[in-house]
């Protein structure tokens, strides 16, 4: 039996902001905060 690989043609580039109530209760409540923490983890993963 010969199988052919599955080819994905989906290219999704949209993003959707979460509801304000969700953001207010989130530990990481902005993209900027996420990027700051990500950079911190990349710079020193042992202490992060």
Image (cartoon, grey):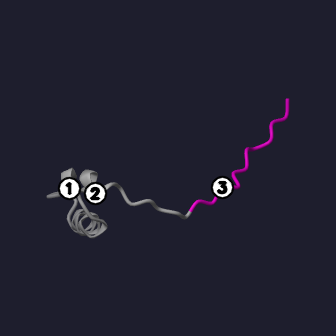
Residue 27 in view here: no
What residue occupies the far right of the structure in this picture? 1
Dot 2: within a 10 Å radius of its alpha carbon, few (fewer than 14), some, or many (20 or more) residues?
A: few
Q: In the rendered image of this protein, does residue 30 appear above or below residue 25?
A: below
Mark on residue 3? Answer: none
Dot 3: within a 10 Å radius of its alpha carbon, few (fewer than 14), some, or many (20 or more) residues?
A: few
Circle 1 is placed at which residue position?
24
Circle 3 is placed at which residue position?
10
- Residue 35 position, x and y percent, is 29, 68
- For marks 3 and 2, the one nearer the N-term is 3
With 27 as the anchor, is 34 left or right in this view?
Answer: right
Q: CA distance from mark 3 to mark 1?
A: 32 Å
Disc 2 element: helix
- Of the residues tagged 3 and 2, which is closer to the observer? 2
At 52% across and 63% down in the image, what residue appears? 14
Region rendered in magenta: 1-12
Check if residue 46 falls in the magenta segment: no
- Residue 2 position, x and y percent, is 85, 34
Callouts 3 and 2 close, C-beta under 8 Å: no
Circle 2 is placed at which residue position?
20
Dot 1: within a 10 Å radius of its alpha carbon, few (fewer than 14), some, or many (20 or more) residues?
A: few
User: Which image quarter: residue 38?
Assistant: bottom left
Specify the quadrant that holds the C terminus.
bottom left
- Of the residues tagged 3 and 1, which is closer to the observer? 1
Disc 1 element: helix
């Amino acid at each position: 039996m010969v199988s052919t690989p599955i080819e994905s043609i989906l290219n999704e580039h949209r993003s959707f902001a979460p509801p304000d109530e969700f953001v207010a209760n989130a530990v990481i409540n902005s993209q900027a905060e996420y990027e700051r923490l990500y950079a911190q983890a990349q710079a020193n993963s042992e202490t992060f």
